[in-house]
Amino acid sequence: MKLTDKIDFIPLIELPTTKGAQNNRVPEGTSFTNTKEWDLYQEIELRKNYIDIPRPITTGIYQYRLFDIKIEDLKTLIKLHIGDMPIKDACSLFGGYAISINGQIALYPQCCGLMEEIQQWKNILNENFEDFSLLECHPSPVITKNKERIIIFCNDEGEPFYPYFSNNQIELNYQITKNAFIILLNQLHLFSKKLDTLAAEFNTESIANILIWGRNEKE
């Protein structure tokens, strides 16, 4: 990549919906082979629960920009995520962090990814970080550093990366990537304050510490 390239970390979430007997017929194929019908199906499902539906990050990929979710829909999202359990027992929200290069997504969150993977990504703040993987998602990329480059390997013999057209190897300038990640951290802390305005309703001191940071945020 070039030093002029723009890198962004984009927090993405999956939006849970209620499931019931009145659900629409599930389209044939996949969201890549039958995108139009799957996009419409997903929109109808979300309208059953949410007031203001954001657009998915990419057509056929039903992950949504966390910062685009309005407060009333955040409340619904939390209720659907925790179900009947106390919020203190919940895992963080399903999703993760996409990496965009010049406006094009190079890496999407993988299956079962969680927002608390932010804690693993913090490794890149140390310029001498050791190779690491993300602990919850599968398959997981392996993030390494070679001099001034971050190299993200997206290879797994047992499971393909999502979507199927993902790059097998992503190379990024270390300092540009680190700066982009610091911006993400600042954005997440600001968003956490918004999320925590709902804390009293869910009988907890901090929703964000549970649903974003995985109970590990000290700041």
Image: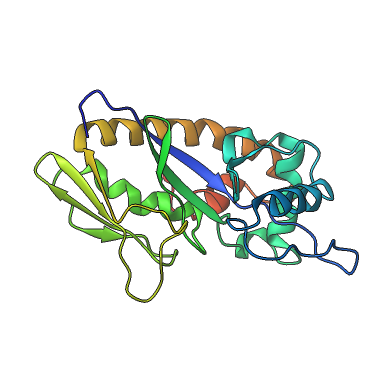
Q: How many marks?
A: 0
In front: 147, or 101? 101
The residue lying at 69 percent from left, 49 percent from top is 36
Q: Quadrant of residue 22?
A: bottom right
Locate residue 40, reporting x and y percent: 75, 48
As drawn, which residue projects farthest toward the front? 33
The residue lying at 66 percent from left, 37 percent from top is 69
As drawn, which residue projects farthest toward the right? 22
Image position of 65 (left or right of 147): right
In front: 37, or 107? 37
* Quarter of the figure that contains the N terminus: top left
* Quarter of the figure that contains the C terminus: top left
As drawn, which residue projects farthest toward the bottom? 158
Locate residue 27, reporting x and y percent: 74, 62
Q: Is residue 59 visible?
A: yes
Locate residue 51, reporting x and y percent: 81, 38
Image position of 194 (left or right of 112): right
As drawn, which residue projects farthest toward the top? 4
The residue lying at 69 percent from left, 61 percent from top is 82
Image position of 37 (left or right of 210): right
The residue lying at 57 percent from left, 56 percent from top is 94
Locate residue 178, reporting x and y percent: 27, 36
In front: 198, or 109? 109
Image position of 155 (left or right of 40): left
Q: Quadrant of residue 105?
A: top left
In front: 1, or 112? 1
